[in-house]
Amino acid sequence: MGIRLGPFGSGLTSRRHIRGSSLLLVLLIFTILFPLKLMPANKRELRAYLRAQRTALSAQQQRQHAQALAQGFLQAPSLLKHRHIAFYLPQDGEIDPRPLMQVLLKRRHCVYLPVLHPVSHHQLWFVRYHTKMPLIANRFGILEPQLTAYGHRASNRLPAWALGIIALPLVGFDSQGGRLGMGGGFYDRSLAFTRRAQGNKPLLLGLAHECQKLDDLPVEPWDIPLQGVLTEAHLYWHNGKG
């Protein structure tokens, strides 16, 4: 089920730049070779196609989508009721949640960011974010909170099960709650506990551009499904959520 959101906003700052002609060429080639109805099942090809889709968006489109994403979230009582929410810092054309993060901070929500676990392989910590917090690039070149004494202090972190919402970046999504990530498996491993029948569980919400939606994605047994996806145009719910 899709819920139509309001009109685009404007006036946001962004560090996105218009991508080079090579990315547009990749997108054109994949569009010719793999029309949407005949998309390849190979995850590597899907990632290349969908990443080309989102990086082909102009800086203005990225700003508009970020504003519309924030507006859509703020119009959804089922999302706003949660106080502890994890987001991410965007890269590689991902939809930008930072305008939304700033609004939620002003409304006294607690915002968290994922950090690569310093010990456990392929696991994430969720560190409480504030605007003056120092950020560093991790080994993948993704900005994350610097694990100084602040980040190591348990009172400044929450385990994934204690969060109200975890907003996940993604490369692609489908109407069944399937999520295609970058392939590292960090979220799948960190959220494996959500498969248990009992215990607290966060709402898993994908954030994406509408152009990243497909009819069906190839999924593996270890892939963690999403309960919903928010784009610049719709809020999709899956598995009876919402």
Image (tube, rainbow, N blue to C red):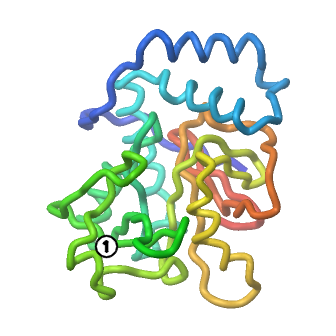
Q: Position of residue 107 (x, y in %)?
A: 27, 68
Q: Quadrant of residue 37?
A: top right
The image shows residue 136, relative to residue 47, as above or below, that is: below
Number of callouts: 1
Above/below status of 44 relative to 102: above
Q: Position of residue 173 (x, y in %)?
A: 68, 45
Q: Is residue 83 left or right of 37 when viewed as pictured?
A: left
Instruction: Count residues near mark 1 (Cα–Cα under 10 Å), then give few for <14, some for 14-19, many for 20+.
Output: many
Image: 218 above or below 148 = above
Residue in the image at 28% along x and 35% along y: 14
* Element on which disc 1 rests: strand
Q: Is residue 142 above or below residue 19?
A: below
For residue 63, which quarter of the picture? top left
Residue 230 rendering spot, x and y as whole percentages: 56, 50
The answer to whether residue 156 is left or right of residue 4 is left
Please state, as top left, top right, bottom left or bottom right, where the C terminus lies in the image. Answer: bottom right
Q: Nearer the viewer, residue 83 or 7?
A: 83
Residue closer to the observer: 97 or 161: 161
Q: Toward the viewer: 90 or 231? A: 90
**Residue matched to label 1:** 128
The picture places residue 160, in percent across and down from the top left corner, at: 51, 77
Q: Amino acid at mark 1?
A: Arg
Residue at x 56% of width, y 61% of height: 186
Residue closer to the observer: 129 or 147: 147
Side of 132 relative to 11 (left or right): left
Q: Residue at x 33, y 58 (%)?
A: 144
